[in-house]
Image (cartoon, rainbow, N blue to C red):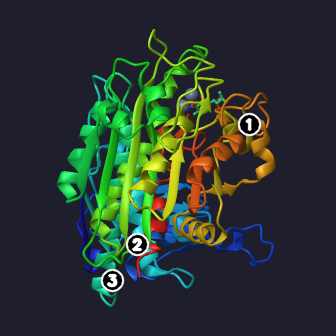
Amino acid sequence: MNTEVISPQLSSLATGLLVAFAFDAAKQKGAGKSETPQVKLLTENAEVTNAARECLAGGEFAAGAAETLLLHSPAGLAAKRLLLVGIAAPTAHELRKAAAVAVRFAKPRNLRELAFVAPSGESLDPAAALRAVVEGACIGDFDSDTYRSERKDKSIERLAVAVDASADRGQAEAAVREGMILGEAQTLTRSLVNEPGNKMTPTVLGQRAAEMCRKYGLQCEVYGAEKLHELKMGAFWSVAKGSSEPPALIVMTYEPPNAPAGPVLGLVGKGITFDTGGISIKSADGMEKMKYDMAGGASMIGAMQAIAQLQPAVKVIGIVCAAENMPSGKAMKPGDIPIAMSGKAIEIINTDAEGRLVLADGLCYAKRLGATHLIDAATLTGACVVALGTINAGAFCNDEETYRRFAEAARKTGERFWRLPVEDDYAEHIKSNIADIMNTGGSRSGGAITAAMFLKEFAEDTPWIHLDIAGVAWVDDQKPWMAKGPTGVPMRTIVEWVRGYAP
Ligand code: BES
Ligand code: ZN
Ligand code: ZN
């Protein structure tokens, strides 16, 4: 998608689809009770306001969230069509969705070019709003039907953002550029997650990461089984050894010359390219979805792409532990005791709790490489889906200041997290009689928390955030602003968290 900032006389802008946003002022907080909608456009532009006036007065458009109204040959405009998109409230987060709605309106109608009227309003930060609009356009542009034979790629080719002639052009261009960087990184994450297990093996994930790193000037190492042995990554290897697909330990490094010696941020992603459960095999029902068990890893690859372009002055190491969890004659068995890189002996109770095993060594390695702050993302537990559904990801943290920064980042991106406890009492469940720790407790209750407690044993005292994204990395129902399938969450928040450390 090509993007540009323009500041034309809107009446003479020749475009197939001009998009403007609107909201119902009567429904806003503090507006008092009113039965009749009070639709307001998010632009002061007189030409657009005139073109929309008649239909707004007619009451046929209430500007509800994701509501659309298409006007052909709008009066006084050179645009062929004017699309009004409703938003629940005049905020950047709602605009992100609304821009995605506009793109998803255009795509099936074969409209490949669109122009957004840059949103403006009292409570809106113009740069944040523009950035959100462009991110949203990218989010809306993604479709997951890559392998359908008759798929016609209806992606948007050109996107213009029309700002007022008096607007700060440099600021608008920077905001659009940022929006594109984040939007494209999210698309990268989603397209990696979307690939089926037979196409997206650990080796292929490593190749895709290496390609990205080459393109954006990051250092990249992709190691195989030998390196796992050399580093004594017994936990990671215990998962990898059951598959005939070799594992990949992906290490992406961003080290700008202006970065201070510390902090060093370690991003660690679970990259299970398919999770059968191993010997503790999963039931067939829904197992096909376990191709998305590498969404945490894909988020880190997307995040590193965005970081490489945004150039924050902080060193970042991205690690993806990629393997396939398979049952076989070589697979780990319940009762086995692998020794993790940290030296801890782990009693395997359930081979389906494999994510925490690969992450145990990933976290340890990030620290070995100098990470002072850790964040991991993993489709780790079904228990987290039971607890929080598909709206919030579970977030765990052992350090208040680190979490404060993370919550601040999430506030900016609109991605949603719910903090769950990290308390020693929960670790009782994973004490082992024979080894240092068990990979699952006997009880299913509090499963997302015991998984986090397991990881904490490997993060130790290093400030660390764990994101359980099992419920949010994939959605089964499509939304007006998003195709069903991979979401790309929590890539944008991770990038924002990283940027928060740049002086
Ligand atoms: N990959 C799964 C978790 C998962 C479940 C992701 C649903 C996405 C949707 C993970 O490896 C797993 O199987 N966890 C087990 C842990 C249990 C054996 C302690 C689970 O949640 O059942
Ligand atoms: Zn599993
Ligand atoms: Zn898994």
Residue 33's disc is none
Q: Are marks 2 and 3 in contact (CB under 8 Å)?
A: no
Residue 260, position as x, y percentages in the image: 36, 78
Name the residue type under label 1: Lys
- The amino acid type found where label 2 is placed reads Leu
Callouts 3 and 1 close, C-beta under 8 Å:
no
Q: What residue occupies the far bottom of the structure in this picture?
A: 166
Q: Is residue 498 left or right of residue 310?
A: right
Q: From the viewer's perspective, tell me whether residue 162 is left or right of residue 481.
A: left
Callout 2: SS: helix
Q: Secondary structure at mark 1?
A: loop
Q: Earlier in the sequence, mark 2 or mark 1?
A: 2
In the image, residue 442 sits, relative to residue 160, either above or below, namely above
198 or 447, which lies in front? Answer: 447
Q: Which residue is mark 1?
A: 431
| Distance (Cα) linking label 2 and label 3 | 10 Å
Whole-number angstrom distance, CA of label 3 to CA of label 1 = 55 Å
Give the residue pinned by disc 3.
171
Decide which of tag 2 and tag 3 comes sooner along the chain: 2
* Residue 305 higher or lower than 238, as above or below: below
Q: Residue 130 — which label?
A: 2
- Quadrant of picture, ligand 1: top right
SS at badge 3 = helix
